[in-house]
Image (cartoon, rainbow, N blue to C red):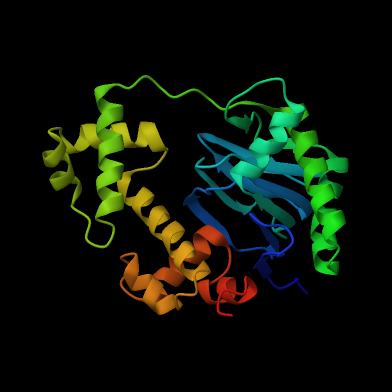
């Protein structure tokens, strides 16, 4: 009998700026999305497959999937039995502070590979989870810093420099700002292009080049990210859905699960926001 899917997305109060996810997925698929944080996903069983930028990669037991902030990726089972993993989402500021101690470079840092084969580091990620579950703050904090330092030394470096600011890139940035501003009542692609003085197809191409997804996909991702902030502040899911431009709570639920991995109600309860 197949193990049922399960997921817990939570925070340990003694690890501020860090989210934790422990999940087993079989049929689950993550749509194209981004995180404001880094991602360390230690696979303990099965295989996860995911698109990272334009590459399809796989991670299995003893390996860690590493995703930088604001980097487009997906996720789905790489084998019929699915995959189990423990994931840490550390705030970019925390990773940057550790990088200042362990890397000889200065500036924004990132990881250079989407999958690393490092069973010891994977055990450290699992250790962070178990220490948090046991309420051992000293161990959780120590292990988090140890695994971050190890990953930075082995697979870290300066973040990729910004691309030259072409006219297309400038239009993409302006389009993103307009979509952020008008999240609850966004313009059509044609209206957006006309406002920026370009053609719809040129804007679509420039936006994909700049952000790894078309404007409508980016907007859905941005709505989920804003909804998370509202849920963290204690806003009920139904109100959060409307506030970010979704039709209703089921509309939010569908996209939230495809990006975060759990429904918004479960996410809010586990993180204690309702309290």
Residue under the point 37% across and 19% down = 164
Q: For residue 61, say whether it is visible.
A: no
Q: Nearer the viewer, residue 52 or 197?
A: 197
Q: Residue 100: horizontal and vertical position, in percent?
A: 69, 30
Left-right relation of 259 to 7? left
Query: Which x, y percent locates residue 197?
Result: 12, 33
Of residue 32 and residue 40, the one placed in the foreground of this image is 40
Q: How many marks?
A: 0
Location of residue 104 (image quadrant): top right
- For residue 23, what is the image quadrant? bottom right
Where is the N terminus found, in terms of image quarters? bottom right
Q: Residue at x 70, y 54 (%)?
A: 87
Q: Quadrant of the C terminus?
A: bottom right
- The image shows residue 115 at horizontal and vertical percentages of 70, 37
Look at the image and tell me whether residue 176 can be seen. yes
> Does 67 sit above or below residue 170?
below
Occupied quadrant, residue 95: top right
- x%, y% of residue 176? 30, 43
Q: Is residue 213 left or right of residue 90?
A: left
On screen, 29 above or below 142? Answer: below
Q: Residue at x 60, y 77 (%)?
A: 269
Q: Residue at x 44, y 60 (%)?
A: 224
Work out whether 52 lies above or below 181: above
Q: Is residue 103 above or below residue 142?
A: above
């Amino acid at each position: 009998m197949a193990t049922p899917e399960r997921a817990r997305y939570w925070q340990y109060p003694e690890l501020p700026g860090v989210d934790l996810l422990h999940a087993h997925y079989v049929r689950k698929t993550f749509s194209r999305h981004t995180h404001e944080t880094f991602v360390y996903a230690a696979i303990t069983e099965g295989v996860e497959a995911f698109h990272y930028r334009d590459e399809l990669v796989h991670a299995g037991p003893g390996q860690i999937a590493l995703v930088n902030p604001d980097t487009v990726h997906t996720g789905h089972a790489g084998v019929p039995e699915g995959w189990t993993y423990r994931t840490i989402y550390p705030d970019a500021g925390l990773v940057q502070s550790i990088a200042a101690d362990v890397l000889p470079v200065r500036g924004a840092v990132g990881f250079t590979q989407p999958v690393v084969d490092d069973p010891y580091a994977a055990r450290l990620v699992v250790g962070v989870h178990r220490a948090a579950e046991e309420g051992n703050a000293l161990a959780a904090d120590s292990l988090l810093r140890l695994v971050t330092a190890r990953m930075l030394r082995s697979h870290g470096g300066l973040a990729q420099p910004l691309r030259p600011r072409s006219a297309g890139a400038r239009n993409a940035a302006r389009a993103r700002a307009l979509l952020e501003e008008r999240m609850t009542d966004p313009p059509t692609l044609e209206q957006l292009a006309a406002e920026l003085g370009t053609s719809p197809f040129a804007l679509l191409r420039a936006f994909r080049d700049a952000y790894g997804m078309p404007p409508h996909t980016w907007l859905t991702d941005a709505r989920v990210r804003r909804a998370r902030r509202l849920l963290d502040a204690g806003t009920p899911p139904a109100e959060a859905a409307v506030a970010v431009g979704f039709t209703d709570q089921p509309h939010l639920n569908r996209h939230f699960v495809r990006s975060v991995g759990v429904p918004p109600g479960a996410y809010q309860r586990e993180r204690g926001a309702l309290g």
